[in-house]
């Protein structure tokens, strides 16, 4: 295991070899170790690698392995759990993200594959309005027992972690630095409590400082870990908007708390809603409706469905859906030979009739 992990760490230590390229190398070579054994001529022929990247691997091989050796010592000493993207303990939702990390480092007691995972992000300069809503929405989420994910930053991030702990919900802080430190240091006591019921997660090795450029990269993990992202207060160019846009790109649901038009800390959220990048959220009922999380009501539509008279096109759509546990709207539109707008309209009608329901990731299934 240590030898495999050594090469997993090493491949992430080669300068300018990102996660997408690293995964490509591993896929073509067969393993992280084999990447370092291949000849330059073989590496150059791998699609998307070329002479420049092949040179980086050959040139930095010794240095990368030395860095990996040091990291192995740190991992063992500090009881860090490494999560390699091809191993069973890797967060399954991140496997659907092309740029998901090759390797993650985790501290704590976390079930990343919790049936329900919610990311909560927002401004560092949270108002009482934002903090009150954050506390309220986490408390309302408690019956669903989700994993709460955020970034351990000032403002809404730390508010969401504290609210999760208060309601005995597991919570994970995704860091923009190594696990040898806590940033900001004022949140150390909260981080320690999180390790007991949740934990800390990063794709940065020990010794990595929280540089400004690390935070946008960190945000892809916050978005990718979850079924949905809630944005609570954001300025027009707030960092939490990056997380929302990434979540959209990952085809994950986004919710935003609206605010008054002249409130600068609500401008980002209002724009997300106005541009249809996020659904408006007033309470957890909005999440339950859109995500289909009201389990206790799922038995009622089954009876309703028996008495719904379907049109010819609706019968085609429901017939296709009966062959799939869940299906994306674009795939359904293609198979039914209907336009996307027609399919969307029909699914909305069937949802109102209690025949279909929306799942996380904008997937659909029969009730």
Image (cartoon, grey):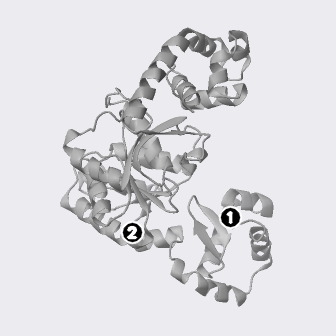
Q: Quadrant of residue 333?
A: bottom right
Asked if residue 48 is positioned above or below residue 336 in the image, the reply reads above
Residue at horizontal 76%, vertical 57%? 334
Pick the residue in front: 84 or 220: 84
Q: Name which of mark 2 and mark 1 comes first in the sequence.
A: 2
Residue 337 showing in the rendered view: no
Residue at mark 2: 141
Asked if residue 72 is positioned above or below residue 187 in the image, the reply reads above
Task: Judge the density around disc 2: few (<14), some (14-19), many (≥20) Cα neighbours within 10 Å.
Answer: many
Pick the residue in front: 268 or 248: 248
Q: What secondary structure is found at the residue carrying circle 2?
A: helix
Residue 144 showing in the rendered view: yes
Quarter of the C terminus within the rendering: bottom right
Residue at horizontal 46%, vertical 42%? 220
In the image, 224: left or right of 319?
A: left
Which percent across, then down, holds residue 131? 24, 60
Which percent across, then down, holds residue 238? 32, 44
Residue at horizontal 34%, vertical 67%? 137
Which percent across, then down, holds residue 58? 60, 11
Please identify, in this view, whether the residue under mark 2 or under mark 1 is nearer the observer: 2
Asked if residue 299 is positioned above or below residue 44 in the image, the reply reads below
User: Real-space Cα distance between discs 2 and 1?
Assistant: 24 Å
Q: Quadrant of residue 357?
A: bottom right
Residue at horizontal 51%, vertical 27%? 9
Q: What secondary structure is found at the residue carrying circle 1?
A: loop
Residue at mark 1: 326
């Amino acid at each position: 295991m240590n030898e495999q992990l050594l090469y997993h760490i090493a491949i992430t230590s080669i300068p300018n070899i990102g996660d997408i390229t690293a995964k490509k190398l591993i896929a073509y070579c067969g393993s992280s170790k084999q990447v370092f054994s291949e000849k330059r001529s073989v590496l150059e022929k791998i699609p998307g690698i070329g002479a420049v990247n092949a040179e980086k691997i050959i040139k930095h091989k010794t240095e990368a392995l030395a860095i990996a050796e040091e990291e192995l010592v740190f991992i063992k000493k500090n009881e860090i759990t490494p999560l390699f993207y091809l191993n069973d303990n890797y967060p399954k939702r991140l496997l659907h993200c092309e740029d998901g990390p090759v390797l993650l480092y985790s501290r704590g007691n976390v079930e990343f594959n919790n049936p329900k995972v919610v990311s909560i992000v927002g401004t560092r300069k949270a108002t009482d309005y934002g903090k009150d809503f954050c506390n309220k929405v986490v408390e309302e989420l408690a019956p669903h027992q989700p994993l709460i994910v955020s970034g351990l930053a000032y403002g809404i991030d730390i508010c969401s972690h504290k609210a999760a702990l208060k309601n005995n919900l597991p919570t994970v802080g995704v860091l923009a630095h190594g696990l040898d430190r806590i940033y900001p240091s004022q949140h150390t006591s909260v981080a320690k409590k999180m390790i007991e019921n949740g934990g800390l997660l990063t794709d940065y090795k020990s010794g990595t400082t929280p540089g400004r450029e690390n935070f946008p990269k960190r945000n892809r993990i916050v978005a990718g870990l979850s079924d949905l992202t809630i944005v609570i207060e954001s300025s027009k160019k707030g960092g939490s908007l990056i997380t929302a846009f990434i979540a959209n790109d990952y085809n994950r649901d986004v919710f935003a708390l609206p605010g008054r038009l002249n409130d600068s800390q609500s401008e980002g959220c209002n724009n997300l809603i106005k541009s249809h990048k996020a659904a408006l959220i007033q309470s957890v009922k909005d999440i339950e409706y859109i995500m289909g999380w009201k389990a206790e009501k799922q038995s009622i539509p089954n009876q309703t469905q028996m008495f719904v008279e379907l049109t010819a096109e609706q019968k085609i759509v429901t017939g296709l859906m009966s062959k799939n546990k869940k299906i994306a709207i674009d795939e359904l539109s293609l198979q039914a030979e209907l336009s996307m707008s027609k399919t969307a309209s029909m699914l909305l009608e069937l949802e109102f009739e209690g025949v279909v329901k929306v799942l996380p990731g904008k997937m659909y299934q029969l009730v």
